[in-house]
Each structure stands twice: as C-alpha cells, then as structure tokens.
Amino acid sequence: MNPKRIISLVPSQTELLFDLGLEEEIVGVTKFCIHPANKVENKALVGGTKTLDINRIHALKPDLILANKEENTRGQIDDLQRHYPVHITDIATLPDALAMIREVGNLVGRVQESDKLAQQIESLLLPCLSSFTLSVAYLIWRKTYMVAASGTFIHAMLDVAGFRNAFADQLRYPEVTPDDLQKVQPDLIFLSSEPYPFTKKHINELQEICPSSQVLLVDGEMFSWYGSRLLRASAYFMNLRNEINHDRRSN
C-alpha cells in the first residue's frame, strides 16, 4: 500500500514529492523546505534538518519519512527508525540523484512519473558536459572559509557544468585559509547562496585575497539540490558559462 502520511526531512526531496503530485500525502516538512513556496506553507513544520522536533513528528503519525545521510543527524534518524519506515539517501553524483528519484517514485506509487522526470533531467544535463575547464573554488561558508571538495554532490555538479574543482585533491567540505586559496589560484571563485548566504558585499573580500580570480555569486540550489530542481540546472549552467565568458572577454 502506498504511504498516505509522508514527512520529508530533505528540502530537495520535498520539492520532488510535490512535483510527483503528492501534495495531499505530505504532512510534514522542515523549515528549510522552501519549494514550492505556495504549498509548503500549508504543511506542518518539524524543525530544522539537523534539529528535528521528534515529538512533533510523532504527533503527525507518518507512515514514511524521507531522510538523507548528509543533511540529517544520525542519532535523530536512528531514533525515528525505531518507530517508522525511514528511507535514507546518500547522494554524491548525478547518477545517484537519478536513482534516488526513481527509488522515491517507487516508494510512493509514482513509478512512471518519477522515471519520466529522471529521463528529462538526464537528457537535459548530460549534453551540458563541455571542455569548459576553468578551475573553481566553490565556497559554502565564511569565517572560517569552507569549500566543496571531492565526494560531494556539488563537486559532481561542477563537473557536469563543465568546471574543474580547484580543491579536487581534498575530500568533503574542508576548511581553507586565504593562503590556501592563493596557493591554488582558481580561475573562478563561486560564492554559494547556501548554506552561508553570500551576497555582493563578499565579492570584494574574496577579490582581495585572489585578485586574478573572477568572483561570482551562484545559486547554491542549482549545485546542491538533487531532486526535481535539477530540471532547471542545465539552463542555469549555460547562462552562467555565458556570463563568465562575457566577463572574461570584457577584461
């Protein structure tokens, strides 16, 4: 029997559930589940991705919980698994994301819809591969600086978008110093919109550290959300590459 009371603890998978037509079945989401805005506002909040309100979850009596190894804390998920079916994902590559979409579709009775969605994403993103090999330092945090390195979905999406990760020799999300940034001399520095909310005022700060690098604000959702938002990634990457090429020609 398909689940009738679903709680999603993963923002990108929350959006996926809505796009698969499960608005009625979704009973709880996290405060970071912001898409689609006009629909999540009507759902019960169960805390943050790493600060879940377990009592609130119990009150909602879910028959399926979607969680993620990286985004949720092991202790809380272990607790929930003692009471409910919990589907835990671990996404590091685009194939992982496509497999997850199909797995979730199978779990919730939307096999055809999820397969069609995965095929659309694959057809849109795979042609995005190019010889656009500028090196990128992708910053996700400030004070201290942290970057996305190998073994992350962001690293995989940088590759899909045609960039080369300047910190590919490191793993996960290492802390880096200004000296580290200067040492790798990235062609580009991407300041992600999440989890740290980088804004225009931070561009000069990084530009002073690496004067020869091109510093840009980027939409973190396009590099780190592994659900149906991937449908928008190809067009975003194309526009981003065009912006970079235009700026480099101008300089």
Image (spheres, rainbow, N blue to C red):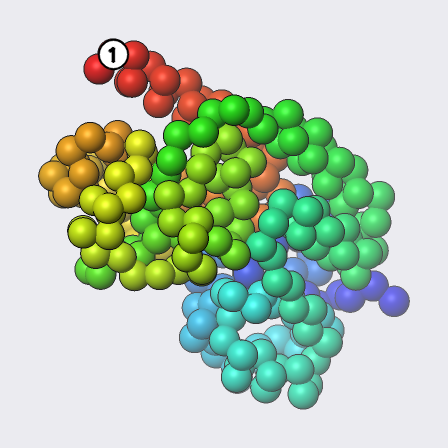
Residue 18 location, x and y as percent? 64, 49
Residue 33 location, x and y as percent? 49, 56
Q: Count the marks.
A: 1
Give the structural element (helix, strand or loop) at label 1.
helix
Residue type, numbered disc 1: Ser
Instruction: Determine whether, in the image, residue 198 is placed left or right of residue 106.
Output: left
Q: Which residue is mark 1?
A: 250
Q: Name the residue located 41 percent from the left edge and 57 percent from the top edge.
A: 170
Number of residues whose C-alpha sits closer than 10 Å to that of mark 1, classed few (under 14), some (14–19) or many (20 or more): few
Residue 106 location, x and y as percent? 81, 56
Vertical comparison of 13 with 248: above or below: below
Instruction: Determine whether, in the image, residue 10 is placed left or right of residue 82.
Output: left
Residue 63 location, x and y as percent? 73, 73
* Residue located farthest toward the right when viewing the structure as drawn: 1
Instruction: Determine whether, in the image, residue 188 is placed left or right of residue 55.
Output: left
Q: Nearer the viewer, residue 71 or 148?
A: 148
Q: Nearer the viewer, residue 80 or 4?
A: 80
Q: Nearer the viewer, residue 184 or 67?
A: 184
Residue 219 visible at all:
yes
Instruction: Determine whether, in the image, residue 197 is placed left or right of residue 237.
Output: left
Q: Name the residue located 58 percent from the left edge and 27 percent from the top edge.
A: 128
